[in-house]
Image: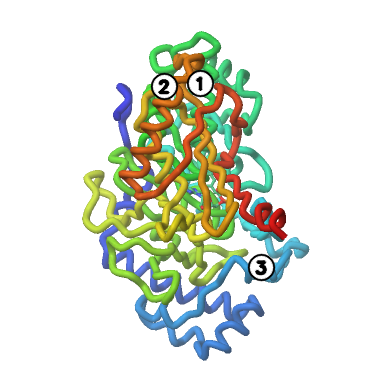
Amino acid sequence: MSAPHHTETIFQPALEQIERGELEALQLERLKTTVADCYTKIPFYTKLMDEAGVVPDDIRGLDDLVKLPFTTKQDMRAAYPFNMFALDPHDPAAGVQRIHASSGTTGVATVVGHTQADLDYWGDTFARGIAEAGGGPGSILQIAYGYGLFTGGLGAHEGGIRMGCTILPMSSGNTKRQVQMMHDMKVDILACTPSYALLIADTAIEMGYDPASEFAISGCVLGAEPCSDNMRKEIERKLGALVVDIYGLSEVMGPGVSCECQYQDGLHVAEDQFIIEIIDPQTLQPVPDGTYGEVVFTTLVKECCPLIRYRTRDISRIIPGDCECGRTLRRMDRIQGRTDDMLILRGVNVFPSQIEQVAKQFSELSGYYQLIIERPEESDVVTLEVEPVPAFEFDEIRRIEDLQRRIAAELKSNLQIKVNVKLVEPKTITRSEGKAVRVIDRREEGKNVRK
Ligand code: DLL
């Protein structure tokens, strides 16, 4: 959907519409520098490349990239805190300006440093996203991603500076205040996670506003978690704004590695700064354009923490063909899921986002849901707990059961999986101000109980 005052401009036309041959020459030049830097400045890479029998001079063309070994999240964890840095963060002359780290909920955090040049390049990519959402210099940019070690808040902030926006650095939380400021200050661009954007919209509605008609908001730059098309439509409808999907990860940079344009048909990868590859996660071989696989990135301009062939565990594909917007940067599809959150239900592979996509076809349902996975016996049992919209009358058991049955039948026919559907009372599912927790995996608990 296009908001009434939506006019997209291209922030860096010389790079975003670069001719492919020119881009490849730029990528090669930058790749050579990156590989040489990694080899000479980061002992981890010296060892890795020695073991793989490659030296920087072996990189003569972009095709030689495949000769280089992969870097994994485990490698980065093992390097905690600074062993993957090309620069010494204690040396004032090295110019390391800032450190970010992944949340590390499941293990040791991955730590990444940024020089001023790194931050400037990063700002450029997020600023492209602001332009793609219809923003520009003078836009009031409300940043409701968390500020801190998480890259959302400060990454968006770099973008706002680069674009020349007036920044409202809210960070996440305090939702009523977010709504009030958005309204009073006539915010035009919102940056946060999709689940938080939905909560902000719903809170505004609860406060008696109709944001779609009463607020000035025209574009949202939302990312950091998967969001189904139906959920996106709901946010767009409630806020009356265009939503572009922005992708990134802290190891590689942060938000801005790729971002959608107003055509919402894939995310343009900042290929001047990163080389994208899609590989088969089993064979580790590249797959043809159009085929889904694991996304791998090599950084091209990073000074402090360059990365070679980083395996993201995210599943996507290259969308073949040109985009109507005129950008020549290739597009990756929206993230389908992660190799590590794929559920295998009686042999069928499904991602939580596919379940969301089906469930959200029901107008009776809100965007608040959770998947509970248990393994009482040998196979997994999945329960979708979902809240109906506030207007749904939660009193008649027959109506509830009927809806549950229809959702389960739809999931069965679309995804060939059996999911127990349980409607829960409004506001029972924990609201997220950042990345929503969609999957509660109780399989390990189940095992412990059995023992
Ligand atoms: O989430 C960076 C970010 C912040 C991106 C704000 C966009 C907006 P991490 O915390 O390191 O970094 O988490 C990275 O989040 O590997 C994906 O699995 C997931 N992710 C990020 N963006 C998207 C997206 C930030 N647009 C991990 N769609 C990634 C789906 C996403 N998943």
Residue 263 position, x and y percent, is 28, 40
For label 1, the residue is 202
Q: Earlier in the sequence, mark 2 or mark 1?
A: 1
Residue shown at 58%/37% (left/top)? 145
Label number found at residue 85: 3
Q: Amino acid at mark 1?
A: Asp
Q: Please identify the quarter of the rendering in which residue 436 is found.
A: top right
Q: Are marks 1 and 3 in contact (CB under 8 Å)?
A: no
Q: Amino acid at mark 2?
A: Lys
Q: Earlier in the sequence, mark 2 or mark 3?
A: 3
Tag 3, which secondary structure?
Answer: loop
As drawn, 446 above or below 52: above
Q: Are marks 2 and 1 in contact (CB under 8 Å)?
A: yes
As drawn, 213 above or below 12: above
The image shows a total of numbered marks equal to 3
Q: Left or right: where does residue 26 sit relative to residue 379?
A: left
Q: Quadrant of the N terminus?
A: top left
Q: Amino acid at mark 3?
A: Phe
View extreme (right): residue: 90
Residue shown at 52%/57% (left/top)? 379
For label 2, the residue is 238
In this rendered view, identify the residue nearer to me: 215 or 409.
Answer: 409
Alpha-carbon neighbours of circle 3 within 10 Å: few (<14), some, or many (≥20)?
A: many
Tag 1, which secondary structure?
Answer: helix
Tag 2, which secondary structure?
Answer: helix
Q: Please identify the quarter of the rendering in which residue 433 is found.
A: top right
Q: Give the Cα separation between the discs numbered 2 and 3.
A: 44 Å
Q: Give the Cα separation between the discs numbered 1 and 3.
A: 43 Å
